Image (cartoon, rainbow, N blue to C red):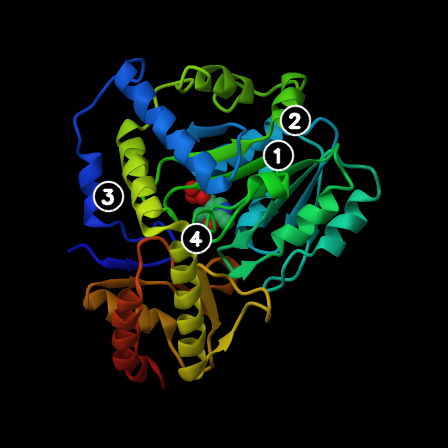
């Protein structure tokens, strides 16, 4: 009845992760919770190479995306967009009643350091949002180059969505100098949805104190005050935090370098497979994601039909997102996936593709 998930979020969750969630409940104001909270935030700091705080939010990633702009936009926000998620962030910013402009690259293209530099040079903005890995298009933007440019603008809050890249590629928050670096756990972390994690700079925490209308649920000051006691402002999704604790231990046991190499290897294999099947890549050369591959459909494959055939065999596959649905498809290669999982998918699709091609 359940299909094996080959969609780019939520991703397939390993049995051991699901089992970690079945541990008995504890109270979040009990010492037992503080111990786990500290272990998890310490692990996240190690993962992100930061000594500044990392907070746990019981929400999906969009909660923290909204929270980040509510805490850090005092003047005007520049929302950079090159796909569905980054585009939506502009809408979210506006709906919070904040002043914001959107700057877009074509879908399939990255956000570049030059674009960012040009926009910030106007002096109109005190915050910027950018999505590192656009899950709708399979584009990974050059975050390190953007971070270099950001060093010229220390007064502009640097807010980054790494929802589908965090833990799969190296993210050195100290070197990048991000003010907010956020992720939801149902992508590269390989957990069920419902928890978001975010690293916040001390500079951003200072700024947030003087931002009006931060609300309550995503108020950075609340997160900070509670985190000092290894706690959260309100009752967190404790079962998911058990799972994250388990998953972080697994990551460190695998070794981060090995984990990054595994993602690189899966990305390379998937890119080659897509071309071997006669498809082309949607994402621009040099900007292709390490965690998912977005193929451009040819004019002879019925992706809806392919999805139906795969579904009947017990597999959930993707046939594109937003305005590029059915003209593209996405293959995830992240979290706990292995080369063997990919080969299982490739074998299935090689068998089904002739039946979905006219
Ligand atoms: C999935 C995703 C989101 C949205 O995450 P939710 O957890 O559904 O709020 C935002 N940004 C990117 C890049 C994503 O892949």
Q: Which mark is residue 179?
A: 1
Instruction: Give percent across and percent down for residue 108.
Output: 59, 64
The residue beneath circle 2 is 203
Asked whether residue 59 is in view, the answer is no
Give the Cα distance between marks 1 and 3. 30 Å
Are dots 2 and 1 in contact, CB under 8 Å? yes
Q: Please tell me which residue lies in front, 336 or 331.
A: 336
First in sequence: mark 4 vs mark 1 = 4
Name the secondary structure under disc 4: loop
The residue lying at 16 percent from left, 26 percent from top is 24
Which residue in the structure is indicated by mark 4? 168
For label 2, the crowd category at 10 Å Cα-Cα, with few meaning under 14, some 14 to 19 and many 20 or more, is: some
Q: Which residue is mark 3?
A: 17
Which one is in front, 259 or 329? 259
Q: Residues within 10 Å of mark 1 (few under 14, many from 20)?
A: many
Which badge, 2 or 1, comes first in the chain's sequence?
A: 1
Q: Residues within 10 Å of mark 3 (few under 14, many from 20)?
A: many
Question: Mark 2 or 3 closer to N-term?
Answer: 3
Q: Earlier in the sequence, mark 1 or mark 3?
A: 3
How far apart marks 4 and 1 lie (CA) works out to 20 Å
- Work out whether residue 238 or residue 251 is closer to the camera in this orientation and state it: 251
Residue 246 shown left or right of residue 188 in the figure: left
Q: Is residue 350 left or right of residue 215?
A: left
Q: Is residue 96 above or below residue 83?
A: above
Quarter occupied by the C terminus: bottom left
């Amino acid at each position: 009845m359940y299909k094996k998930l080959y969609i780019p979020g939520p991703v397939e969750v390993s049995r051991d992760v699901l089992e970690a969630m079945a541990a008995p409940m504890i109270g979040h104001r009990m010492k037992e919770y503080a111990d786990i909270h500290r272990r998890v935030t310490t692990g996240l700091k190690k993962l992100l190479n930061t000594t500044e705080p990392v907070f746990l939010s019981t929400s999906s990633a969009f909660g923290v995306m909204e929270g980040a702009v509510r805490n850090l936009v005092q003047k005007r926000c520049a929302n950079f967009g090159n796909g569905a998620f980054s585009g939506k962030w502009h809408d979210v910013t506006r709906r919070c009643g904040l002043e914001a402009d959107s700057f877009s690259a074509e879908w399939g293209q990255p956000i570049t350091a030059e674009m960012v530099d040009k926009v910030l040079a106007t002096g109109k903005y005190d915050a910027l949002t950018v999505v590192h890995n656009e899950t709708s298009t399979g584009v990974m933007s050059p975050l390190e180059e953007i971070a270099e440019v950001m060093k010229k603008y220390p007064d502009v809050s640097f807010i980054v969505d790494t929802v589908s890249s965090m833990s799969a590629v190296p993210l050195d928050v100290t070197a990048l100098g991000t003010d907010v670096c956020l992720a939801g756990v149902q992508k590269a972390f390989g957990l069920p949805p419902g928890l978001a994690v975010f690293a916040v700079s001390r500079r951003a925490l200072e700024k947030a104190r003087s931002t009006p209308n931060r609300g309550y649920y995503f108020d950075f000051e609340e997160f900070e005050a509670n985190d000092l006691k290894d706690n959260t402002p309100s009752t967190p999704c404790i079962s998911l935090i058990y799972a994250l604790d388990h998953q972080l231990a697994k990551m460190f046991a695998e070794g981060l370098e090995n984990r990054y190499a595994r993602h690189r290897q899966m990305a390379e294999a998937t890119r080659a497979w897509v071309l071997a099947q006669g498809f082309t890549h949607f994402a621009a050369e040099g900007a292709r994601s390490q965690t998912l591959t977005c193929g451009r459909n040819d004019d002879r494959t019925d992706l809806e039909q392919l999805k139906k055939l795969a579904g009947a065999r017990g597999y959930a596959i993707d046939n594109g997102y937003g305005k590029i649905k059915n003209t593209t498809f996405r293959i995830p290669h992240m979290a706990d996936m292995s080369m063997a999982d990919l080969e299982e998918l490739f074998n299935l699709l090689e068998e089904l593709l002739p039946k979905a091609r006219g």
